[in-house]
Image: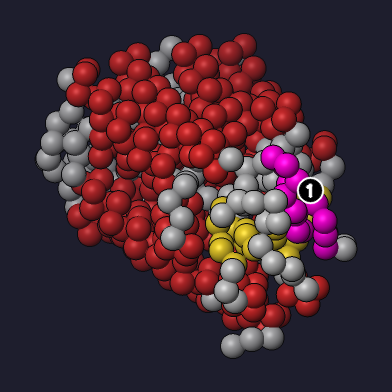
């Protein structure tokens, strides 16, 4: 599933991840947060399409694949 | 990348399983190379928090785990002090996790080590652990969350590892300040250097791999992901091989080391541990690792476990090897399940209101 267009969204809670998957629909897979992004063992959403802002309620940050790394492209404002 | 994470977990699990067998060879009680709950209980005794004479010793393994996680997280940048995610609730949950573990006589890690030693009572406990995680997952998928943690100062994050170092230095310099069992499980231990080194290795590896005895089963329930469970499986296989090689494997329910065969209470005790671990976001081992990474909330959970261990022996809540729990212990497990389900229900209702959904 990993390719250059892939995005990962991390969340503050499991429930927020479930809500995101429900709203996003097809093309969203929930998996453990990549170790390179966090030492937490929470759940992240992996998507390959665009992600509109209103879907990101409860999200912590969004990353885009950049070579072998994940580059942050959005972060929740405090 | 995913493959690398799986390799890391499998290697971590295999090393922990092998170290656990080695520590038994070096002197730790059978099937107790590592047990987070038992060792925190021994530390509670060593620090005069309870006076059960057979379970008093300042286990260097626990100190090593915290300091190993602290050191590697500072080096790799994972040290991110934070706190404020319902610390008092985490203390209460940690308290009852310890009660459940001491009614079964082991944390989830020792449950796997007991299984690898042929102790079938641990299989009954595993079913309870899975059931508890299942109940916890129902709450998680319906909105349960203990809330966000806020960033804290580096001083705040380093305070617990520093306190751990202070206690350990005092233990080495002034051992007469602490209590030492002369018989029973507390009197059986590997040399201090070996125990500390083992703890450091486990702390480092568990921090890097995010090993969690509850997280693997939780992820299977919630997202059908089998990554985290690899560590759990690898510990079992490595310890099983080690036990077979050292002649420590004995299949059955009766006469297992530091255990009892009261099936209902093995099941319910670990159900309480499973539910509490999901609510805390990780098993007792994981709480130590997170405390080393600077999580004040996990320090609250660890202190809750320490307090729970003291209460378990001061109020006769812990099981006795061979005979199982008494009336107080049985009542404490039931109360614990009621309290944790009540907390989970109240928090879940509140969180769902926050998201504006039924």
* B214 or B30, nearer to the observer: B214
- Span shown in magenta: A61-76
Determine whether, in the image, residue B140 is placed left or right of residue B131.
right
Mark 1 burial class by Cα count in 10 Å: few <14, some 14-19, many 20+: some
Give the farthest residue toward the bottom.
B358
Query: Can residue B36 be seen from the camera position used here?
Result: no
As drawn, A72 above or below B204: below
Question: Which residue sits at x=20%, y=55%?
Answer: B263
Question: Which residue sits at x=47%, y=46%?
Answer: B228
Residue B324 at x, y percent in the picture? 23, 48
Quadrant that contains the N terminus of chain A: bottom right
Quadrant that contains the C terminus of chain A: bottom right
Question: Which residue sits at x=34%, y=63%?
Answer: B131
Image quadrant in which you'd find residue B159: top right
Question: Which residue sits at x=32%, y=23%?
Answer: B21
Q: Is residue B86 magenta?
A: no
Give the farthest residue toward the front.
A4
* B235 or B282, nearer to the observer: B235
Decide whether the magenta segment is chiefly helix, strand or loop.
Answer: strand
Residue A12 at x, y percent in the picture? 69, 62
Determine whether, in the image, residue A19 is placed left or right of residue B225.
right
Query: Can residue B253 be seen from the camera position used here?
Result: yes
Mark 1 = which residue? A71
Q: Chain of mark 1?
A: A
Q: Specify how the rendered protein is coloured.
A: secondary structure
Determine whether, in the image, residue A66 is placed left or right of residue A15.
right
Determine whether, in the image, residue B112 is placed left or right of residue A47.
left
């Amino acid at each position: 599933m990993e390719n250059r267009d892939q995005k990962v969204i991390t969340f503050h809670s499991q429930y927020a991840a479930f809500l995101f998957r429900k709203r996003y629909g097809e093309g969203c897979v929930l998996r453990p947060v990549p170790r390179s992004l966090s030492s937490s063992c929470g759940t992240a959403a992996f998507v390959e399409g665009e992600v509109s802002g209103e879907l990101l309620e409860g999200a912590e940050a969004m990353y885009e694949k950049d070579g072998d790394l994940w580059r942050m492209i959005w972060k929740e404002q405090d | 990348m995913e493959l690398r994470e799986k390799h890391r977990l499998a290697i971590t699990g295999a090393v922990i399983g092998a170290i656990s067998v080695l520590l038994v060879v070096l002197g730790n009680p059978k099937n107790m190379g590592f047990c987070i709950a038992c060792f925190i209980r021994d530390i509670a005794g060593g620090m005069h928090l309870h006076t059960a004479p057979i379970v008093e010793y300042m286990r260097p393994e626990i100190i090593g785990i915290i300091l190993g996680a602290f050191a590697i997280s500072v080096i790799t940048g994972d040290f991110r002090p934070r706190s404020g995610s319902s610390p008092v609730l985490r203390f209460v949950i940690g308290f009852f996790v310890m009660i459940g573990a001491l009614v079964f006589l082991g944390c989830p890690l020792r449950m796997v080590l007991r299984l690898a030693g042929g102790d079938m009572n641990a299989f009954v406990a595993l079913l309870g652990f899975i059931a508890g995680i299942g109940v916890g997952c129902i709450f998680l998928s319906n909105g349960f969350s203990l809330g966000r943690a806020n960033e804290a100062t580096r001083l705040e994050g380093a305070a617990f590892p520093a306190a751990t170092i202070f206690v350990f230095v005092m233990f080495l310099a002034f051992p007469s300040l602490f209590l030492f069992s002369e018989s029973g499980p507390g009197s059986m231990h590997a040399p201090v250097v070996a125990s500390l080194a083992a703890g450091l290795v486990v702390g480092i590896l568990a921090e890097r791999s995010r090993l969690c005895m509850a997280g693997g089963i939780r992820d299977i329930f919630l997202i059908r992901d089998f990554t985290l469970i690899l560590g759990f499986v690898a510990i079992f296989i490595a310890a099983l091989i080690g036990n077979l090689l050292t002649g420590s494997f004995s299949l059955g329910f009766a006469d297992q080391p530091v255990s009892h065969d009261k099936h209902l209470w093995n099941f319910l005790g670990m159900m309480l541990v499973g539910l509490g671990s999901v609510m805390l976001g990780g098993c007792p081992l994981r709480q130590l690792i997170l405390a080393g990474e600077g999580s004040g909330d996990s320090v609250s959970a660890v202190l809750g476990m320490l307090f729970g261990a003291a209460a378990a022996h001061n109020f006769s809540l812990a099981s006795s090897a061979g005979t199982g729990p008494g009336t107080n212990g049985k009542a404490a497990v039931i109360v614990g399940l009621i309290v944790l389900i009540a907390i989970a229900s109240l928090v879940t209702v509140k969180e769902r209101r926050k998201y504006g959904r039924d």
